[in-house]
Image: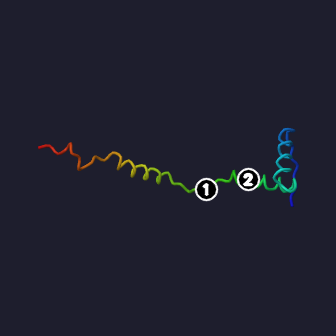
């Protein structure tokens, strides 16, 4: 297992120790799970968005917003 050294401020280390004591069996488990959850939080799903797709979606949505109602009572003039 790889190892590394990390320098933390006294405040952050105190918070870590308190969390490790209350939530985890060992400090090693706390470090592993907290780092893993932090990495997971920063992972971003890569979506292959084509800008043209957004333009088409926007145009399609605007088509219904700007169209006039063909059955409008205002157009029925005798």
Which residue is found at the position 21% from the left and 42% from the top? 74
Does the residue at mark 2 contact the one at mark 1 (Cβ under 8 Å)?
Answer: no
Could you tell me which secondary element the residue under label 1 belongs to?
Answer: loop
Q: Label 2: state its secondary structure.
A: helix
Q: Quadrant of the C terminus?
A: top left
Residue 9, percent across and down? 85, 39
Q: Residue 23 carries which label?
A: none
Give coordinates of residue 36: x percent, y percent: 76, 55
Residue 66: x and y, percent?
A: 33, 45
**Dot 1, how many residues are within 10 Å of its Cα: few (below 14), some (14-19), or many (20+)?**
few
Which dot, 2 or 1, sits closer to the camera? Answer: 2
Q: Earlier in the sequence, mark 2 or mark 1?
A: 2
Could you say which quadrant of the image residue 47 lies in? bottom right
Q: Which residue is drawn at 78% across and 52% down?
A: 34
Foreground of the two, 54 or 15: 15
**Closer to the camera in the image, 70 or 23:** 23
Q: At 23% across and 46% down in the image, what residue appears? A: 72
State the scheme by which the image is colored.
Answer: rainbow
Q: Name the residue under label 2.
A: 39
Q: In which quarter of the image is the N terminus?
A: bottom right
Residue 43 as seen in the image, left or right of residue 76: right
The residue carrying mark 1 is: 46
- Residue shown at 81%/56% (left/top)? 32
């Amino acid at each position: 297992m790889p190892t590394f050294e990390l320098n933390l401020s006294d405040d952050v280390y105190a918070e870590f120790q308190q969390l490790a004591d209350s939530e985890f069996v060992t400090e090693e488990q706390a470090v592993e799970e907290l780092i893993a959850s932090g990495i997971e939080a920063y992972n971003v799903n890569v979506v292959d968005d084509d800008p043209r797709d957004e333009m088409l979606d926007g145009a399609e949505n605007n088509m219904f917003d700007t169209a006039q109602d063909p059955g409008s009572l205002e157009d029925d003039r005798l």
